[in-house]
Image (spheres, coloured by chain):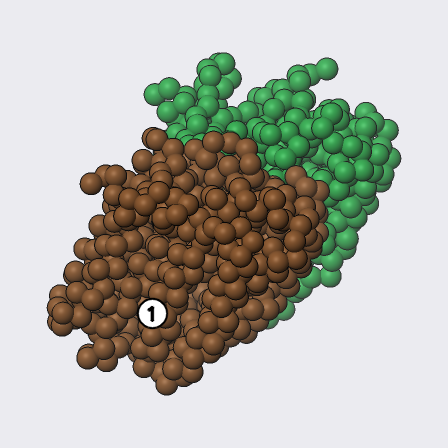
Chain colours: A brown, B green
C-alpha cells in the first residue's frame, strides 16, 4: 500500500470525481469529497515523510520502467507542493457546503463537487508526475474543470470570464505542448529525468531554444505573470467564492511549480540563466507586475477583484525570487508559494463569509463589519497583515528572505521595489479595514457568518501565524529543495 | 520568584490583563480594578527584574527560534530596565488618571480603550526587554497597531484623518527604512543580538554605514526626528491619557530607546566615531530641536503645543545619543526618565483642564490658576522641567548633555541647548504667568474647580516625581553609567 502512495495521491480524487455525480444529494457529495480530499491530504503528508526518510521516490506506472513507461517521481520539491495543494483544497472544501448552497443553483451543486475533485486531481497529477507529457495531460484536466467551475458563478459575467480564461489558458497549454513536442523531437524522451540528461547534448540547437521559449511563455500564462495575467482578475472576481479561494490558493502555485521544474530540473540552471537573458526578462516583468497590480488594486471597488490584482502582484514576488537565479532567491519563491496560498486562501474565505451574509463583496458591504461580523472582520485584518508582511506572519518570512536574497546579490533597487510593494499593500488592505472599522453598517446588530465558514477561515488565519513563528517545516523544505534544484544538496 | 520568571511575567501579566479587561466590559468598576491590579503587578515584576539585574543574576529567555540565528528572546540591561520601569510605573498613575478622565469626559467604548491600553503596555515591555533587533522590531510594530484604535478612539472624521497620518507614517517608515536596515545588518553579521560594543565593526565600510545609520534614524519614526515627526501632532486627537502615557512616554520613548540601543549595541560608539558623516545625525537632531520648539511657539492648541515640545525634547535624546560622548549617552538615558515625568504631568494638566473647564486652547487659560491651583502648579513644575530649571528633573539630564558636549568639544550641541532653553522659556512661561496673574477674560458659564480627584492625585504624583528626580537620581545614574562601561 505504502509503495503505491504516489499514484494513490492522484487516482483517489480522480476516481472520486464521477462518484460525486452518482451521489446526487449535494450534502452527501460534499461529505464524500471532503473525505476524499482529507485522504489525499493524508497521502501527501505520508509522501513528504517518506521523502524525508528515504529520499526520492520513483514509482513506475503499471510496472513499466522509465524512461519507457510513465514515472511518478516524488522529491522534496513536489512532495512539498503536493502538501500545499491538498491541505488548501481540503480546508477550503470544509467550508464549501455552506457557501455553495447559497451561491450555486441547486441542480448544479453536485457538479461543483465533482469538478472540484477533478480539478484537484489534475493539479496533484501535474505535480506528482515525472513525465513531461503527463504534465500537459493533467494541466488540461485541471484547466478544463476550472473553466467549468468559474462558469458556475451566478453572475452572468462569470461565463464571459470563464471563456476568456479558456482562450488564454488554451493558448498557454498549447504553448507548453509545443515546447514538450520540440523537446521530444530532439531527445526522443518524455521522462523528465531522462530529458534533463539528454538535453545537454542538444542544448545549442534552435529547436531546444524554441521549446524553452514556448514553455516559459506558456507557463507564464498559466501562472499569470504580467502582462499575461489578463484572465485572472475576471476569473477570480466572477467565480463562486469557494472556487476563487481554491484556485487562488492552488492553481497559480502549481503553475509556478511547473516553471521551476522546467527551468531548474529539465533545462538546468546554467542553461536557463547562463545561456539566455531569462533573468533580464523575468525580473522587469515581475517588477512591473508587482507595482502596477498593487497600484491598481488600491482603487478597486470590488474587494474580490482587489485581492485578485493583489494575487498578480504576489506572483511578481514569486517570479522575482526565481529570476534572481540564486539559491536564496529560489528559497524565497518557494516559501512564498506556500505562504501566499495561506494568506490568499484565508482572505478569499473571509470574503466568502462576507458574501454569504451581505450578499456581495463590494467595499460598501464591508461597512461596519467590525460590529456586524467581528470574527470575519478580524480574520480579514490578520490575513491582511500577513499580506502586508507584518512580523510574526508568514508574509514577513517571505519578505525577509526575498530582501535577504536581493541584498546578497547587492540588488538594492529590488529591495526598494519589494518594500514599496508592501507599502502599497498597506494602502489596499488599510482601505478595507478602515471601512470595516469606522463605517456605519446598513443593518446594525450582529450577523456573524456560520461556524462552517468560520472554522476553515480561522484555520488558515491561524496557520498564517503558526508558520510565521514556527518556520522549521517551511524554511527547512524550501532551503533544501532550492539547494537541490541549484545543483547542490541532496534534495533532503 | 527568580528574576528570570519575573521577566517572563513582565510580558505575560499585561497580556493576560488585556484579555481580562476585554472580558470584564460589562462591569466597569471591576474592569478598572483589573487594570490597576495588572499595572501594579507588572511594576512589581519589573522591580524584581531590576533587583535581579543589580545583584548579578543571569537573566535571559529564548521563546522561539524563527530562522537561522534569529529568535524571539528577551534579556535586560540598564537601558531596558529604565524604560520598563518608567513605562510600567507611570502606567499605574495613568490608570488612576484615565478612570477619572474617561468617566469625566463621558467617552464611549471604554472597554476597548482600556484593553488597547494594556496591549500597548505589553508591546512596550516587549520593546524594552528585547534581546535582539528582530524581537524589538516585532514589538515595535505591535505597539504601532495596538495604539491605532486609541488614536482614532473618537471615530469622527478628524480622528480618522489623524489615524491615517499616524499609521501611514509609522508603518511606511518602518517598512521602507527600518526593516531593510535590520535585514542589512543581518546580512552583514549573521546575527541581530544586542552586544556591548556593537556588532558591526569591521563588516561595513564608512559610506555604507552612513546610509545604514540614516535608515535607522528615519526608520525609527517613533523618535520623531524631522521630517518623520508629523504623526505625533496627528496623534493628539486621542483622549488625553493616551497622549500622556503613550505619546509622551511609552511610544515615543520606545523610539529613542531603539535608537540608543542601535547606536550602542549594534553600531558601537567607538565604531561610529570613525564614520565620517555621522555628525550629520547630530545636526538633523539639532535642527529638529530648534525647529520643533519654534513651531511650538506658534501653537494655539495646548495639546499640539505639547506635541511639538515632545518632538523637540525627543531630539535632545537623539542628539545626545549621536554625539557619542560617554556623558551624552548617560544624559540621553537620563532624559528618557526626566522628560517622561515632566511631559506626562503637562498632559495630565491639559486633560484636567479639558475635563473641568472644557478648554483646549492656550489663549483660554487666563486666570485659570485660581480655579485650578493644584493643576496649574503641576503644569508649572512640568514646564520648568522642560526648560531645564532646577529643582526639576529636566535640569539633571540637560547637565549631562551639556557636559557631554564639552567632553567632545561639540559646540553645535552646546549652542542648540542654549537656544532651545530660551525657546522653551518663551512658550511655557507666558502660559504660567497668564494662568496665575491675569484676570479671567469672562467668568465661565458654570463655575468649576479642580477636575475629579483621581486626575488631580495623578498629576500631583507625577509633578512630585519631577521634583524628586532632581534630588534622588543617584541610583539611576549609577545604573546608566554601565552602558558606557562605567564611570570614567
Q: Nearer the viewer, residue A490 or B403?
A: A490
Q: Nearer the viewer, residue A407 or B55?
A: A407
Instruction: Using the rendered view, name the quadrant where residue A156 is placed.
Output: bottom left
The answer to whether residue A350 of the structure is visible from this angle is no
For the N terminus of chain A, the image quarter is top left
Please count the marks in the image: 1
User: x%, y% of residue B464?
Assistant: 54, 37
Q: Is residue B383 left or right of residue A229?
A: right
User: x%, y% of residue A127?
Assistant: 39, 52
For the C terminus of chain A, the image quarter is top left
The answer to whether residue B68 of the structure is visible from this angle is yes
Task: Output the chain of dot 1.
Answer: A
User: x%, y% of residue B487?
Assistant: 69, 16
Q: Is residue B93 left or right of residue A289?
A: left
Residue appearing at x 17%, y 65% in the figure: A19
Q: Please, is residue A172 above or below residue A395 in the view?
A: below
Residue appearing at x 67%, y 50% in the figure: A204
For the residue carrying disc 1, how many other residues have a C-alpha within 10 Å: few (<14), some (14-19), or many (20+)? many
Q: Which residue is mark 1?
A: A145
Residue appearing at x 28%, y 44% in the figure: A63
Q: Is residue A393 left or right of residue B398?
A: left
Question: Under tag 1, what secondary structure?
Answer: helix
Q: Please, is residue B309 above or below residue B14 in the view?
A: below
Q: Residue furthest bottom?
A: A156
Q: Please, is residue B436 above or below residue B445 in the view?
A: above
Q: Nearer the viewer, residue B171 or B90?
A: B171
Q: Please, is residue A45 above or below residue B164 in the view?
A: above
Residue appearing at x 36%, y 70% in the figure: A144
User: x%, y% of residue A150?
Assistant: 36, 74
Amino acid at each position: 500500500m505504502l509503495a503505491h502512495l504516489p499514484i494513490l495521491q492522484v487516482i483517489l480524487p480522480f476516481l472520486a470525481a464521477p462518484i460525486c455525480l452518482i451521489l446526487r444529494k449535494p450534502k452527501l457529495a460534499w461529505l464524500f469529497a471532503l473525505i476524499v480530499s482529507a485522504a489525499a491530504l493524508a497521502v501527501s503528508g505520508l509522501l513528504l515523510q517518506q521523502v524525508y526518510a528515504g529520499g526520492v521516490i520513483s514509482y513506475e506506472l503499471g510496472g513499466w520502467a522509465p524512461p519507457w513507461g510513465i514515472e511518478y517521481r516524488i522529491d522534496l520539491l513536489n512532495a512539498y507542493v503536493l502538501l500545499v495543494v491538498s491541505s488548501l483544497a481540503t480546508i477550503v472544501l470544509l467550508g464549501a457546503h455552506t457557501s455553495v448552497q447559497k451561491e450555486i443553483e441547486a441542480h448544479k451543486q453536485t457538479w461543483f463537487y465533482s469538478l472540484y475533485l477533478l480539478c484537484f486531481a489534475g493539479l496533484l497529477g501535474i505535480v506528482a508526475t515525472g513525465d513531461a507529457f503527463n504534465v500537459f495531460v493533467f494541466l488540461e484536466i485541471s484547466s478544463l474543470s476550472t473553466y467549468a467551475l468559474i462558469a458556475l458563478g451566478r453572475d452572468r459575467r462569470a461565463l464571459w470570464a470563464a471563456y476568456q480564461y479558456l482562450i488564454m489558458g488554451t493558448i498557454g497549454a498549447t504553448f507548453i505542448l509545443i515546447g514538450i513536442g520540440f523537446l521530444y523531437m530532439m531527445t526522443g524522451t518524455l521522462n523528465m529525468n531522462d530529458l534533463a540528461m539528454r538535453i545537454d547534448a542538444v542544448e545549442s540547437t534552435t529547436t531546444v531554444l524554441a521549446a524553452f521559449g514556448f514553455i516559459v511563455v506558456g507557463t507564464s500564462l498559466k501562472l499569470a505573470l504580467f502582462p499575461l495575467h489578463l484572465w485572472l482578475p475576471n476569473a477570480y472576481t466572477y467565480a463562486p467564492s469557494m472556487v476563487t479561494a481554491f484556485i487562488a490558493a492552488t492553481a497559480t502555485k502549481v503553475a509556478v511549480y511547473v516553471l521551476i521544474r522546467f527551468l531548474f530540473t529539465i533545462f538546468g540552471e546554467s542553461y536557463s540563466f547562463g545561456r539566455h537573458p531569462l533573468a533580464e526578462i523575468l525580473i522587469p516583468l515581475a517588477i512591473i507586475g508587482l507595482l502596477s497590480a498593487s497600484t491598481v488594486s488600491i482603487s478597486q471597488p470590488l474587494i474580490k477583484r482587489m485581492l485578485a490584482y493583489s494575487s498578480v502582484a504576489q506572483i511578481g514576488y514569486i517570479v522575482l525570487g526565481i529570476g534572481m537565479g540564486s539559491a536564496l532567491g529560489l528559497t524565497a519563491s518557494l516559501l512564498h508559494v506556500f505562504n501566499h496560498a495561506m494568506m490568499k486562501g484565508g482572505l478569499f474565505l473571509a470574503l466568502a463569509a462576507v458574501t454569504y451574509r451581505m450578499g456581495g463583496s463590494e467595499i460598501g458591504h464591508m461597512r461596519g463589519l467590525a460590529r456586524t461580523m467581528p470574527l470575519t472582520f478580524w480574520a480579514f485584518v490578520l490575513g491582511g497583515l500577513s499580506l502586508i508582511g507584518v512580523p510574526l506572519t508568514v508574509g514577513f518570512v517571505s519578505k525577509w528572505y526575498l530582501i535577504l536574497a536581493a541584498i546578497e546579490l547587492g540588488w538594492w533597487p529590488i529591495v526598494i521595489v519589494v518594500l514599496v510593494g508592501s507599502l502599497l499593500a498597506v494602502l489596499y488592505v488599510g482601505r478595507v479595514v478602515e471601512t470595516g472599522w469606522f463605517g456605519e453598517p446598513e443593518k446594525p446588530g450582529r450577523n456573524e457568518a456560520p461556524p462552517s465558514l468560520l472554522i476553515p477561515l480561522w484555520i488558515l488565519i491561524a496557520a498564517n501565524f503558526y508558520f510565521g513563528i514556527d518556520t522549521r517545516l517551511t524554511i527547512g523544505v524550501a532551503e533544501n529543495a532550492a539547494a537541490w534544484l541549484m545543483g547542490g544538496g541532496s534534495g533532503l | 520568584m527568580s528574576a528570570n520568571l519575573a521577566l517572563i511575567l513582565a510580558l505575560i501579566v499585561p497580556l493576560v490583563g488585556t484579555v481580562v479587561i476585554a472580558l470584564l466590559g460589562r462591569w466597569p468598576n471591576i474592569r478598572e480594578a483589573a487594570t490597576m491590579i495588572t499595572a501594579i503587578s507588572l511594576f512589581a515584576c519589573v522591580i524584581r527584574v531590576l533587583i535581579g539585574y543589580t545583584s548579578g543574576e543571569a537573566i535571559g529567555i529564548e521563546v522561539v527560534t524563527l530562522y537561522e540565528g534569529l529568535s524571539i528572546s528577551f534579556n535586560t540591561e540598564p537601558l531596558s530596565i529604565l524604560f520598563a520601569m518608567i513605562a510600567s510605573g507611570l502606567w499605574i498613575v495613568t490608570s488612576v488618571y484615565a478612570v477619572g478622565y474617561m468617566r469625566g469626559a463621558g467617552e464611549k467604548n471604554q472597554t476597548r480603550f482600556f484593553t488597547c491600553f494594556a496591549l500597548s503596555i505589553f508591546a512596550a515591555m516587549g520593546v524594552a526587554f528585547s534581546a535582539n533587533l528582530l524581537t524589538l522590531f516585532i514589538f515595535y510594530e505591535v505597539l504601532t497597531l495596538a495604539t491605532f484604535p486609541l488614536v482614532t478612539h473618537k471615530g469622527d472624521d478628524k480622528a480618522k484623518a489623524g489615524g491615517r497620518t499616524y499609521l501611514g507614517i509609522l508603518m511606511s517608515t518602518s517598512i521602507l527604512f527600518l526593516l531593510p536596515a535590520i535585514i542589512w545588518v543581518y546580512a552583514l553579521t549573521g546575527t541581530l543580538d544586542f552586544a556591548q560594543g556593537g556588532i558591526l565593526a569591521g563588516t561595513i565600510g564608512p559610506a555604507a554605514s552612513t546610509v545604514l545609520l540614516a535608515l535607522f534614524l528615519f526608520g525609527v519614526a517613533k523618535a520623531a526626528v524631522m521630517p518623520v515627526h508629523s504623526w505625533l501632532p496627528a496623534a493628539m486627537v486621542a483622549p488625553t491619557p493616551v497622549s500622556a502615557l503613550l505619546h509622551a512616554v511609552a511610544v515615543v520613548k520606545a523610539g529613542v530607546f531603539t535608537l540608543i540601543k542601535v547606536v550602542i549595541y549594534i553600531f558601537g560608539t567607538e565604531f561610529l566615531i570613525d564614520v565620517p558623516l555621522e555628525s550629520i545625525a547630530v545636526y538633523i537632531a539639532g535642527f529638529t530641536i530648534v525647529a520643533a520648539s519654534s513651531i511650538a511657539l506658534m501653537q494655539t492648541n495646548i495639546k499640539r503645543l505639547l506635541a511639538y515640545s515632545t518632538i523637540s525634547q525627543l531630539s535632545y535624546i537623539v542628539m545626545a545619543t549621536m554625539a557619542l560622548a560617554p556623558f551624552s549617552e548617560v544624559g540621553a538615558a537620563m532624559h528618557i526618565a526626566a522628560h517622561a515625568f515632566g511631559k506626562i504631568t503637562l498632559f495630565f494638566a491639559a486633560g484636567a483642564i479639558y475635563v473641568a473647564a472644557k478648554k483646549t486652547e492656550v489663549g483660554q487659560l487666563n486666570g485659570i490658576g485660581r480655579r485650578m491651583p493644584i493643576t496649574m502648579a503641576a503644569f508649572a513644575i512640568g514646564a520648568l522641567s522642560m526648560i531645564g530649571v532646577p529643582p526639576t528633573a529636566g535640569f539633571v539630564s540637560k547637565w549631562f548633555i551639556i557636559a557631554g558636549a564639552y567632553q567632545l568639544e561639540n559646540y553645535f550641541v552646546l549652542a542648540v541647548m542654549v537656544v532651545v532653553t530660551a525657546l522653551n522659556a518663551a512658550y511655557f512661561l507666558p502660559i504660567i504667568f497668564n494662568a496665575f496673574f491675569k484676570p479671567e477674560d469672562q467668568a465661565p458659564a458654570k463655575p468649576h474647580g479642580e477636575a475629579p480627584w483621581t486626575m488631580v492625585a495623578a498629576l500631583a504624583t507625577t509633578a512630585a516625581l519631577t521634583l524628586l528626580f532632581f534630588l534622588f537620581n543617584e541610583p539611576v545614574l549609577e545604573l546608566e553609567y554601565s552602558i558606557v562601561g562605567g564611570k570614567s
